[in-house]
Amino acid sequence: MKLRLALVSLAALLAGCGPSTEAKRWASDVTGGDPERGRTAIQHYGCIACHTVDGIRQSEALVGPPLTRFASRSYIAGNLQNNAANLTHFIQHPREVHNDSAMPETGVTDSDARDIASYLYSFQ
Protein backbone atom coordinates (compact mmCIF):
# COMPACT_ATOMS: atom_id res chain seq x y z
CA MET A 1 0.00 0.00 0.00
CA LYS A 2 2.80 2.43 0.88
CA LEU A 3 4.57 1.65 -2.41
CA ARG A 4 1.39 2.32 -4.37
CA LEU A 5 0.88 5.66 -2.59
CA ALA A 6 4.50 6.61 -3.28
CA LEU A 7 4.14 5.75 -6.99
CA VAL A 8 0.91 7.72 -7.29
CA SER A 9 2.55 10.70 -5.57
CA LEU A 10 5.59 10.48 -7.84
CA ALA A 11 3.39 10.31 -10.95
CA ALA A 12 1.44 13.38 -9.81
CA LEU A 13 4.67 15.26 -9.13
CA LEU A 14 6.13 14.39 -12.52
CA ALA A 15 2.91 15.32 -14.30
CA GLY A 16 3.33 18.88 -13.01
CA CYS A 17 6.84 19.21 -14.47
CA GLY A 18 5.83 20.37 -17.90
CA PRO A 19 3.07 20.64 -20.43
CA SER A 20 1.21 17.58 -21.62
CA THR A 21 1.62 16.14 -25.09
CA GLU A 22 -1.87 17.39 -25.92
CA ALA A 23 -1.01 20.93 -24.78
CA LYS A 24 2.14 20.92 -26.90
CA ARG A 25 0.22 19.67 -29.93
CA TRP A 26 -2.47 22.33 -29.48
CA ALA A 27 0.16 25.07 -29.08
CA SER A 28 1.95 23.90 -32.20
CA ASP A 29 -1.28 23.79 -34.20
CA VAL A 30 -2.33 27.28 -33.07
CA THR A 31 1.02 28.99 -33.67
CA GLY A 32 2.62 26.96 -36.46
CA GLY A 33 5.67 26.71 -34.21
CA ASP A 34 7.50 24.03 -32.28
CA PRO A 35 7.49 24.27 -28.48
CA GLU A 36 10.82 22.47 -28.09
CA ARG A 37 12.56 24.86 -30.48
CA GLY A 38 10.77 27.69 -28.67
CA ARG A 39 12.38 26.74 -25.37
CA THR A 40 15.79 26.95 -27.04
CA ALA A 41 14.91 30.26 -28.73
CA ILE A 42 13.79 31.79 -25.43
CA GLN A 43 17.21 31.09 -24.03
CA HIS A 44 19.04 32.13 -27.22
CA TYR A 45 17.37 35.55 -27.41
CA GLY A 46 17.92 36.21 -23.70
CA CYS A 47 14.26 36.37 -22.70
CA ILE A 48 15.13 34.79 -19.35
CA ALA A 49 17.33 37.78 -18.49
CA CYS A 50 14.11 39.74 -17.85
CA HIS A 51 11.30 37.18 -17.53
CA THR A 52 10.45 34.17 -15.42
CA VAL A 53 9.33 31.51 -17.90
CA ASP A 54 7.45 28.28 -17.17
CA GLY A 55 9.64 25.21 -17.42
CA ILE A 56 12.99 27.02 -17.56
CA ARG A 57 14.69 26.67 -14.22
CA GLN A 58 17.29 29.41 -14.79
CA SER A 59 14.59 32.01 -15.40
CA GLU A 60 13.73 33.81 -12.21
CA ALA A 61 14.10 37.39 -13.41
CA LEU A 62 11.56 40.02 -12.49
CA VAL A 63 12.49 42.89 -14.80
CA GLY A 64 9.58 42.10 -17.11
CA PRO A 65 6.36 40.34 -16.17
CA PRO A 66 6.48 36.58 -15.62
CA LEU A 67 5.58 34.60 -18.73
CA THR A 68 3.74 31.89 -16.83
CA ARG A 69 0.50 30.11 -17.80
CA PHE A 70 0.49 32.24 -20.92
CA ALA A 71 -2.29 30.38 -22.76
CA SER A 72 -4.67 31.25 -19.91
CA ARG A 73 -4.18 35.00 -20.21
CA SER A 74 -6.70 37.30 -21.85
CA TYR A 75 -4.30 40.01 -22.96
CA ILE A 76 -0.75 40.47 -24.19
CA ALA A 77 1.07 43.58 -22.96
CA GLY A 78 -2.11 44.81 -21.33
CA ASN A 79 -4.04 45.69 -24.46
CA LEU A 80 -3.77 43.05 -27.20
CA GLN A 81 -6.13 40.11 -27.38
CA ASN A 82 -4.13 36.99 -26.59
CA ASN A 83 -3.91 35.13 -29.88
CA ALA A 84 -1.03 33.65 -31.86
CA ALA A 85 -0.79 36.45 -34.42
CA ASN A 86 -0.66 39.17 -31.76
CA LEU A 87 1.82 37.25 -29.63
CA THR A 88 4.25 36.60 -32.46
CA HIS A 89 4.00 40.26 -33.53
CA PHE A 90 4.68 41.46 -29.98
CA ILE A 91 7.63 39.09 -29.58
CA GLN A 92 9.20 40.52 -32.73
CA HIS A 93 8.20 44.17 -32.45
CA PRO A 94 7.19 45.10 -28.89
CA ARG A 95 7.61 48.82 -29.50
CA GLU A 96 5.10 48.77 -32.34
CA VAL A 97 2.57 47.64 -29.74
CA HIS A 98 3.82 49.94 -26.96
CA ASN A 99 6.24 52.61 -28.08
CA ASP A 100 7.38 53.03 -24.48
CA SER A 101 7.90 49.31 -23.85
CA ALA A 102 11.09 48.39 -22.01
CA MET A 103 11.22 45.19 -24.02
CA PRO A 104 13.91 45.52 -26.66
CA GLU A 105 13.66 44.45 -30.27
CA THR A 106 16.05 41.49 -30.34
CA GLY A 107 15.83 40.52 -34.00
CA VAL A 108 13.59 37.50 -33.44
CA THR A 109 12.86 35.82 -36.78
CA ASP A 110 9.34 34.88 -37.90
CA SER A 111 10.06 31.20 -37.34
CA ASP A 112 11.58 31.74 -33.90
CA ALA A 113 8.66 33.98 -32.87
CA ARG A 114 6.21 31.19 -33.77
CA ASP A 115 8.34 28.70 -31.83
CA ILE A 116 8.51 30.97 -28.77
CA ALA A 117 4.76 31.53 -28.92
CA SER A 118 4.24 27.79 -29.21
CA TYR A 119 6.37 27.18 -26.12
CA LEU A 120 4.54 29.84 -24.11
CA TYR A 121 1.13 28.54 -25.22
CA SER A 122 2.00 25.00 -24.20
CA PHE A 123 1.63 26.13 -20.57
CA GLN A 124 -1.99 26.63 -19.65
Image (cartoon, rainbow, N blue to C red):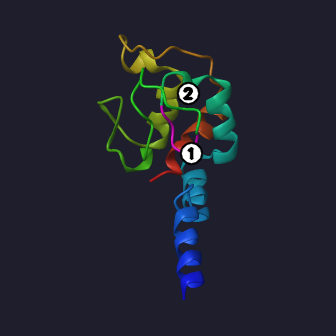
Q: Secondary structure at mark 2?
A: helix
Proximity of marks 2 and 1: CB atoms separated by less than 8 Å? no
11 to 49, vertically: above or below: below
Amino acid carrying mark 2 in the image: Ile
Viewer-proximal residue, 116 or 97?
116
At x 44%, y 54%, the residue is 124
Image coordinates of residue 8 in percent, x first then y, are: 54, 77
Which secondary structure dominates the residues rendered in magenta? loop
Among the two numbered marks 2 and 1 on one chain, the one whose residue lies closer to the N terminus: 2
Q: Nearer the viewer, residue 58 or 101?
A: 58
Callout 1 crowding tier (Cα within 10 Å): few <14, some 14–19, many ≥20:
some
Report which quarter residue 110 is drawn in: top right
Look at the image and give the residue range highlighted in magenta. Answer: 52-56
Residue annotated with mark 1: 55
Instruction: Please provide percent x and percent y for residue 78.
Output: 30, 30
Nearest the viewer among 110 and 60 is 60
Picture quadrant where residue 70 is located: top left
Query: Residue 108: where, in percent of width, then height?
Result: 62, 23
Using the rendered image of the protein, determine whether residue 110 is visible from the camera's viewpoint: no
Label 1 is placed on what type of residue?
Answer: Gly
Instruction: Where is residue 103? Give x, y as percent.
Output: 46, 17
Tag of residue 48: 2
Task: Look at the image and say whether residue 89 sits in the magenta stretch.
Answer: no
Residue at 57 percent of width and 71 percent of height: 11
Q: How many marks?
A: 2
Left or right, 51 with reference to 25:
left
